[in-house]
Amino acid sequence: MTAQEPQKPLVLVTRPQPQNSETCADLQQRGFSVFAEPLLQIRAAPHEPLEESDTEALVFTSRNAVEKLRIGTEAALRLPVYAVGKRTADALKNRGFSDIRKTAETAAVLQKHLDTLKTIEKIRFLYISGRDRAHVFSAGGKILPVREVYKAVRTGNFTENLRLALHNGRIGAILFYSARTAENFIRLAKDCDLLGKCASITIICISTRTADVAGHVRWRKTAVAEKPDHRHMMKALEEAF
């Protein structure tokens, strides 16, 4: 008689769209049941269209920034670009950017790369980002100027289906891809008097910062991805179960 494999949990996916649907599809292929509930909405922020004359090099750390950026002239698509993450780089290619100089695994790795550029202090960089940033980049000892092109808006409440799933103990794991998402989940769970249900839930966090934000609540288990990307989030989830 062989030992039965442990049952995989129902996983709550809190990412905004379209990443939420993509993550759910990946989880289902891996044999997990999913509950999709975006806790942030990505919306474009008012900003000037990018012109070639605005800068000499661009930095991107998220796919959302690539997709929400308004482009003024086709010449801007030929600017040198430095990116964090393969998905960001793929989004840049899809938008038509043709000169991707470096794709780094993390923001820290990209900063180290920028520091190795011999003429970095002479290059006018522009960081294309969201309104809430986890990273600050510098060049030649000066912080890079930022153009905010999107904002993450918190959802105001849980859906009735999620409230019932939490109340009945159906959620076994939650994926937190950002500190803001973890913060919003805790706020909404408190509003619904559901924080006590967290003690039976395992959370997978994309970074130690996200885990620290979530650490104000008692969970069954907290796991942090070895690297802050989707592949390592999936690895941490599968190792947890």
Image (tube, rainbow, N blue to C red):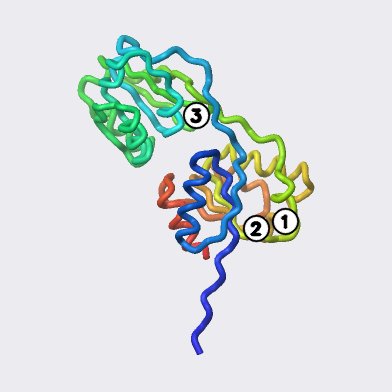
Q: Amino acid at mark 2?
A: Ile
Separation of disc 1 and disc 2 at Cα? Answer: 9 Å
Q: Residue furthest bottom?
A: 1
Rate crowding at label 1 as few (under 14), some (14 to 19) or many (20 or more) other CA atoms within 10 Å.
some
Reading the image, the residue beneath label 1 is 197
Q: Quadrant of residue 142?
A: top left
In the structure shown, which secondary structural element does the residue marked by tag 3 occupy? loop
The residue depicted at 55 percent of the width and 27 percent of the height is: 43
Residue 175 is situated, as x and y percent measured from the top left of the image, at 55, 50
Q: Amino acid at mark 3?
A: Arg
Q: Is residue 199 above or below residue 76?
A: below
Reading the image, the residue beneath label 2 is 171
Residue 57 visible to the viewer: yes
Front residue of 122/96: it is 96
Q: Amino acid at mark 1?
A: Lys
Separation of disc 1 and disc 3 at Cα? Answer: 30 Å
Tell me if label 1 and label 2 are in contact, CB under 8 Å.
yes
**Which disc number belongs to residue 4?**
none
The residue depicted at 49 percent of the width and 26 percent of the height is: 130
Q: Is residue 20 above or below residue 198?
A: above
Taking the image as shown, residue 195 lies to the left or right of residue 129, namely right
* Pointer 1 or 2: first along the chain: 2
Rate crowding at label 2 as few (under 14), some (14 to 19) or many (20 or more) other CA atoms within 10 Å.
many
The residue depicted at 40 percent of the width and 28 percent of the height is: 66
Q: Is residue 41 above or below residue 75?
A: below
Taking the image as shown, residue 166 lies to the left or right of residue 239, namely right
Reading the image, the residue beneath label 3 is 133
Residue 40 is situated, as x and y percent measured from the top left of the image, at 59, 36
Separation of disc 3 and disc 2 at Cα? Answer: 29 Å
Rate crowding at label 3 as few (under 14), some (14 to 19) or many (20 or more) other CA atoms within 10 Å.
few
Mark 3 or 2, closer to the camera: 2
* Pointer 1 or 3: first along the chain: 3
